[in-house]
Image: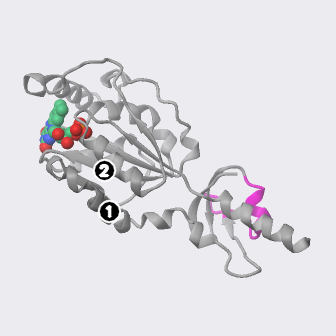
Amino acid sequence: MRKVMFILTLMLSVMAVQAKTLIVYYSYTNNVHRIVGELSKQIEADVVRIEPAEKGLDYAANNYAIGSAQIAAIRNNPGDASSYPAIDPVNVNLAEYNCIIIAAPLWWSNMASPLQSYLFHNGAAMTGKKIGLIVSSASSGISAVEGDAKRLIPNGDFLAPSLWIRSAQTSNAASMLSEWLKTIKYSDLSGIENISPDGSNPTYTVFNLGGQLLGSNVESLQNLESGVYIVNGKKIYLNN
Ligand SMILES: Cc1cc2nc3c(=O)[nH]c(=O)nc-3n(C[C@H](O)[C@H](O)[C@H](O)COP(=O)(O)O)c2cc1C
């Protein structure tokens, strides 16, 4: 009976440290939408699509005039909330996720404005989380979009490199994504393999992000609040 209880306790602990990923994206002409569709087949993740509050805008009309004006407003005054276009409310609890993948169209070298709006209001809540960035553009390079992401999520733990998929490569997204996931070692982020017990007497050395030792056994995991911890040398999200 004691042994059964111990194994049960162990299983609960291992389940408890399962990591969660959120994909946040915006897409006007659905290239990023297709990319996210492929990504969702390859990883377990919740998905949120950002939508501008104002419907029916043609961002491409008159040589992309509306998109251009929105990007210019942000460039001119990036610290002012009124520079960012309104978006529909987003119902997601960022505290549940330890990895967030941002998938963005590029507009005039920058991140498309509706996605910037979301990050302007929520980037601070992504502190300490793993952040992956995927950018779709017709041809322009993505360094300014990376700059936007880092400005809007100043304390994100960015995964390098970002993934750049040109519009014409959208149909190759599946293979580009699987290569990218290997490059950023996405499978290591779950932490599950790294803390699974390999014997009958597992130890879990648990630190908080401030470097304080919180314990070194199964119980020390079970008694913690949900959040990000360093368990056996790996940063993981503990979902208790
Ligand atoms: C307003 C606007 C501005 C754009 N500016 C650029 C640009 O400067 N350089 C570029 O290579 N592509 C630019 N594009 C093209 C998009 O980055 C590209 O089509 C992307 O795949 C769109 O993703 P989506 O289909 O998910 O909206 C722009 C598109 C729009 C709508």
Q: Position of 154 compared to 98: left or right?
A: left
Q: Residue at x 30, y 18 (%)?
A: 55
Counting residues from the start of the chain, the first of labels 1 and 2 encountered is 2
Whether residue 173 appears in magenta in the rendering, the answer is no
Q: Which mark is residue 5?
A: none
Image quarter for residue 43?
bottom left
Image quarter for residue 179?
bottom left
For mark 2, what is the residue?
Answer: 134
Q: Position of 93 compared to 130: left or right?
A: right
Q: Are marks 1 and 2 in contact (CB under 8 Å)?
A: yes
* Mark 1 close to ligand 1, CB under 8 Å: no
Q: Residue at x 35, y 46 (%)?
A: 37
Going by the numbered disc 1, the residue's amino acid type is Trp
For mark 1, what is the residue?
Answer: 180
Image coordinates for residue 119, horizontal then vertical, percent: 40, 36
Residue placed most toward the observer, 210 or 53: 53
Q: Residue at x 16, y 28 (%)?
A: 68
On the question of residue 135 being in view, the answer is yes
Distance from Cα at disc 1 to Cα at disc 2:
10 Å
Going by the numbered disc 2, the residue's amino acid type is Ile
| SS for callout 2 | strand
Whether residue 216 appears in magenta in the rendering, the answer is yes
Image coordinates for residue 184, horizontal then vertical, percent: 38, 64
Q: Which residues are magenta?
A: 207-224
On the question of residue 150 being in view, the answer is no
Image coordinates for residue 124, horizontal then vertical, percent: 48, 40
| SS for callout 1 | helix
Whether 96 is drawn above or below 14: the answer is above
Residue placed most toward the observer, 14 or 230: 14
Image quadrant, ligand 1: top left
Image coordinates for residue 39, horizontal then vertical, percent: 37, 52
Q: Which image quadrant: the N terminus?
A: bottom right
